[in-house]
Image: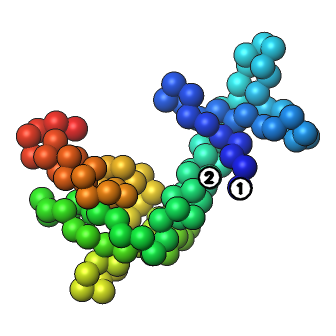
Amino acid sequence: MDRYTQNYNGNWAIFPKDDDLAHIHNVQTGQRYEGKVIDRLAMYEEMHEIYVKHTGDTVYYIGQGECWECIFGLVGFTEDGGIDFMLIDVEGEGINCDYSEWGKTVFPTQEEAESALKTKSTGGD
């Protein structure tokens, strides 16, 4: 899947391909159109990439002051239009996670999770 959104200095921006009909980013003037629609599209694209790369993979979840090994499972949409996903822990229990938890409490590697856990335990954010 081609991406239309990119994180540019902490903000999402749309960068359509040359052959697309809707040009939302004007390269000549630098004018960008931002807002909820762009944020939603970016969120969908991000979750799609995470889903494609990690479904069935082992990921690591930080909860209750510990790092838990889990399997990345289903992706779904919430009633308010958000995205969530489910992890399956080693006992077969499901853990629902909001999209925003990726990279904060859910990590693709144990090293990243343990580093984040260590940072949290020392009072960092």
Q: Is residue 92 above or below residue 69?
A: below
Q: Secondary structure at mark 1?
A: loop
Coordinates of residue 28 in the picture (x, y in percent): 81, 14
In the displayed structure image, the side of residue 31 where residue 69 appears, left or right: left
| Foreground disc of the pair 2, 1 | 1
The residue positioned 25% from the left and 81% from the top of the image is: 90
Question: Measured along the vertical axis of the image, is residue 120 above or below residue 53?
Answer: above
What is the three-letter code of the residue carrying label 1?
Met
Residue 115 appears anywhere in the view: yes
- Specify the quadrant that holds the N terminus: bottom right
- Tell me which residue sits at (49%, 71%) in the image: 55
Q: Quadrant of the C terminus?
A: top left
The picture places residue 9, in percent across and down from the top left corner, at 51, 25
Label 2 close to label 1 by CB (< 8 Å)? yes
Question: Is 125 placed left or right of 101 in the picture?
Answer: left
Q: Is residue 63 above or below residue 28?
A: below
What crowding class fits label 1: few (fewer than 14 Cα within 10 Å), some (14-19), or many (20 or more)? few
- Residue depicted at x 73% and y 34%: 15
**Is residue 102 or residue 38 the one in the foreground?**
102
Residue on which the image places disc 2:
45
Q: Earlier in the sequence, mark 2 or mark 1?
A: 1
Rendered residue at 64%/33% (across/down) = 13
- Mark 2, Cα crowd under 10 Å, few <14 / some 14-19 / many 20+, is some
**Hey, what amino acid is under mark 2?**
Glu
Is residue 79 something that shows in the picture? no
41 in relation to 122, above or below: below
